[in-house]
Amino acid sequence: MDHETKLYLITPPEIADLGSFVSNLGAVLSTGAVTAVQLRLKRRGEAVSDVAALAQLADAAVPVIQAAGAVALINDLPDIAAASGADGVHLGQSDMALKEARALLGEDALIGVTCHASRHLAMVAGETGADYVAFGAFYPTETKDTDQRPAPDILTWWQETMELPCVAIGGISPQNAAPLVAAGADFLAVSSAVWQHPDGPAAGVTALKRVIDNTLAECLDP
């Protein structure tokens, strides 16, 4: 195994108190375990983000994320990414085309694309200039409605085929993360397992990082 799995944190679908959330985010980032944060405000079943709330969140959170040395990404909306100084954007299949987002944000921006369970969509994204592809949902998730259930071996196939990083997403927790790490995920995208952890978000991140480290160690020394 020659990959390293990192944590990619997604914000909860609703944020009641922006100040408290940014404080909690700072605590999570202080663990040093989170490499990227996607700012996403979209309740289950909603097709469009709350644009005004997402812009407000981006203005408050992007500087905190970047000051911690992590990457700040905006879900769906490249214009908010540009206005907030975020590092890039994550696009779904029904969002702005990758080429249009690249034209708006520039060559240095990071752009990821949701590819569900499709190897074809992932190849197209890679050939079109995506910086990473995301597969999922691997497990049932409260964050979004999806009937896509890729098998973990799609991550192994991607590692063997392409050099671009792959993100595993969907219902990932400390209890089920190990197979995705072993299969080759470069990043685990997590949300509820962090924000709803009984001991707080920082403890959620720490628990996930422990699973990653243990699984990688087992793969290197079976």
Image (spheres, rainbow, N blue to C red):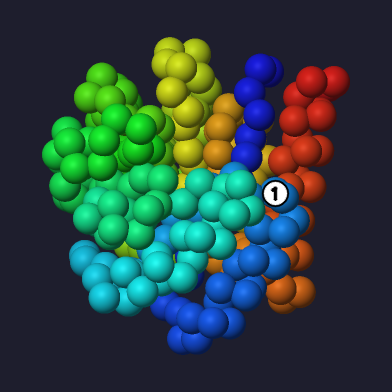
Image height of 12 relative to 138, above or below: below
Image height of 100 relative to 125, above or below: below
Given residues 213 and 97, the one toward you in this image is 97
Q: Name the spot of residue 57 as percent of width and height, x first.
A: 41, 71
Given residues 106 and 185, the one toward you in this image is 106
Mark 1 neighbour density, 10 Å: few (under 14) some (14–19) many (20 or more): some
Q: Looking at this rendering, what residue extends furthest in the right direction?
A: 221
Classify residue 145 by image quadrant: bottom left
Q: Looking at this rendering, what residue extends furthest in the top direction?
A: 161
Q: Name the spot of residue 43 as percent of width and height, x first.
A: 34, 73
Image height of 69 relative to 151, above or below: below
In this rendering, would 23 be left or right of 44? right
Q: Quadrant of the N terminus?
A: top right
In this rendering, would 61 be left or right of 100? right
Q: Looking at this rendering, what residue extends furthest in the bottom direction?
A: 16
Point 56% across, 32% down: residue: 186
Q: Is residue 176 visible?
A: no
Q: Could you tell me how many numbered marks the image carries?
A: 1
Residue tagged 1? 33
User: What amino acid is at disc 1?
Assistant: Ala
Point 60% across, 67% down: residue: 25
In this rendering, would 83 be left or right of 208? left
